[in-house]
Image: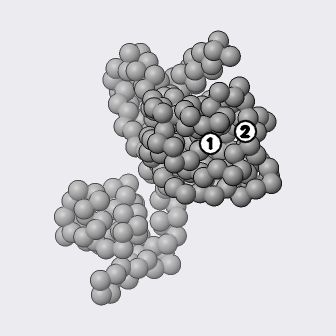
Amino acid sequence: MIEARHLRVLRAVAATGSFSAAGRRLGCTQPAVSQQMKALEASVGTPLLVRGGREIRLTQAGEALVRHASGILAGLTAAEEEIAAIAGLRAGRVRLVSFPSGSSTLVPTALAALRAAHPGTRVSLEEAEPPRSVELLRAGDCDVALAFRYAGASGAEEWDDLVVRPLLADRLVALVPDRHRLAGAGSLAIGDLAEEPWIAGCPRCRGQLVEVCRAAGFTPRIDFATDDYPAVVGLVGAGLGVAVLPQLAVESVRPRGARTVTLEPEVRREVVALTLPDLAQVPAVKATLRELSRAAGHRRAATDEEE
């Protein structure tokens, strides 16, 4: 019989390439990892690992078992959580991964409501940008992923194998220094900034910026690039360039020395919550998705009032 704990150890060994590194990831000793791998090999009746030198490699059987491990563990997690939550969500655990601007805007409202309604449900939060967050979900390392994608962007990933809960359309806005010639404009076309130095954001947003600029007939001169939105705002506020950021990112930072200007025509990114089909019916996961949808709805309503 294959045990779930042995599969988790096998995945860690496959990911790290050694027993000692797998032990550090799992919080156990190297001998304990080795012992569990021997027990798993005895269970399946064939070698799963090739032990040689400093690196450990998977056999063909080991590769096959690792391929199936994520789905097996996701199914077990779904079963465990659903059973634990039968009595009205008095227990449950949700591992949430979110991109940073979602973590500071949508997630706090959603988790506060979830805790008030179901205080026994525990939620852990880790930050990762897509596609990394989606990879974590597919690998069984989280239960819900807050992600985004740009409509029409080249190389946009497909989520057909996942349960997709649409949350909102996040509009991109221009960010210029307070004393910029266009700081007082009601709106601007991205081509109006063609000659400006640019500060670019996360890799996916950076790629989208380049695509939008090329569609407008120019290639942006990117002087600075950083994944840190406060750094982007700070660089713009210091007069070192202009930027285009999602509205959520601007809301998560207090712009000082910088001003937002509406972009025309609109460019938006689709913000969604994702989960695996096996997890979609787990009560704690369903409750988390519901509260994320409500938080997004409150934000949409507030934005409509402002407009």
Of residue 187 and residue 44, the one placed in the foreground of this image is 187
For the residues labelled 2 and 1, the Cα–Cα distance comes to 10 Å
Query: Would residue 246 be visible to someone looking at this image?
Result: no
Q: Which residue is mark 2?
A: 267
What's under tag 2, amino acid-wise?
A: Val
Q: Residue at left 67%, top 55%? A: 220
- Mark 2 touching mark 1, by CB under 8 A? yes
Q: Which residue is mark 1?
A: 244
Q: Is residue 235 left or right of residue 160?
A: left
Q: Quadrant of residue 4?
A: bottom left
Q: Residue at left 30%, top 65%? A: 22
Query: Would residue 197 be visible to someone looking at this image?
Result: yes
- In the rendered image, which quarter contains the C terminus? top right
Q: Is residue 184 above or below residue 268?
A: above
Q: Residue at left 52%, top 64%? A: 67
Classify mark 2: helix, strand or loop.
loop
